[in-house]
Image (cartoon, rainbow, N blue to C red):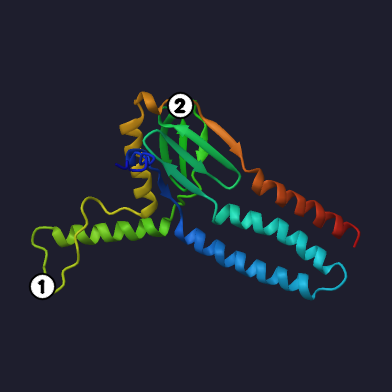
Amino acid sequence: MTTPDHQPPAPDPAYKDRVYRSPSGIAGGVLLLAIVGWLGIDALVTGEGRTPWVALATLLVLVPLVAAFTVRPAVYANEQRLRVRNPFRVITLPWGTVETFRSGYSNEVFDTAGTKYQVWAVPVSLRARKRAARKEAKEARADAPGARRTRSPHPAPVAEGPVRAQGDQIIDELRELLEARGKDPRAQGEVSLRWAYEVMAPAAAGAVLLAILLSFG
């Protein structure tokens, strides 16, 4: 008689991270990295004299910085904590340490000590807000008593609730998680910060090398 192999237990889906990123930021970053890489590699291969060294130093500076501000930012949220990955820092906030979110010209999270952290991965788009406001006003006028209605063979789906820009929707979801999990004993702890040395070290090395090359030019 054989016994089935022991399989590791599946992770609890309640604690799986929700990941929020900026698709437009990632797309722009990939495009910039492709352009910088193409120009830099071409200079490394075909350049003469100091040109390959200058190209190498420039790549060391630009590639980490472009990736840090476009591809790297992300927000991870689960039932216990919020983790904000910004260009140069990673901030981990148990829900019990989060005081509130603020959405103005940028999205920010405040901890209970009053410290503010910017949420780079969820940028504010004033254009998207205006577009959402126009759409909401248009739907309100269409639903008003006495409004003229035209029949369409393919009616557009009606949004439930107020129309919101994507960044504002994400902040609304994070506020709901904060309200639901802020008092949970498993969501308590201390705020932790980690500097992104994997980004800062190569950029600093490239800057030093580039400064040396240019100073002896």
Q: CA distance from mark 2 to mark 1?
A: 53 Å
Q: Residue 146: x percent and y percent?
A: 8, 62
Would you say 118 lies left or right of 183 here?
A: right
Q: Which residue is mark 1?
A: 151
Residue 52 marker: none
Q: Residue at the spot x=59%, y=37% of the render?
A: 194
Question: What is the tally of numbered marks visible in this picture?
Answer: 2
Q: Which residue is mark 2?
A: 112
Q: Residue at the spot x=47%, y=61% of the render?
A: 24
Q: Residue 74: x percent and y percent?
A: 49, 48
* Quadrant for the N terminus in the image: top left
Classify 159 as above or below 82: below
Amino acid type, label 2 = Thr
Q: Residue 4: x percent and y percent?
A: 33, 43
Q: Residue at the spot x=44%, y=28% of the render?
A: 97
Q: Residue 107: x percent and y percent?
A: 45, 45
Q: Residue furthest top?
A: 185
Please tell me how crowded label 2 is: few (under 14), some (14-19), or many (20+) other residues with Cα within 10 Å. few
Nearer the observer: mark 2 or 1; the answer is 2
Q: Quadrant of residue 142?
A: bottom left
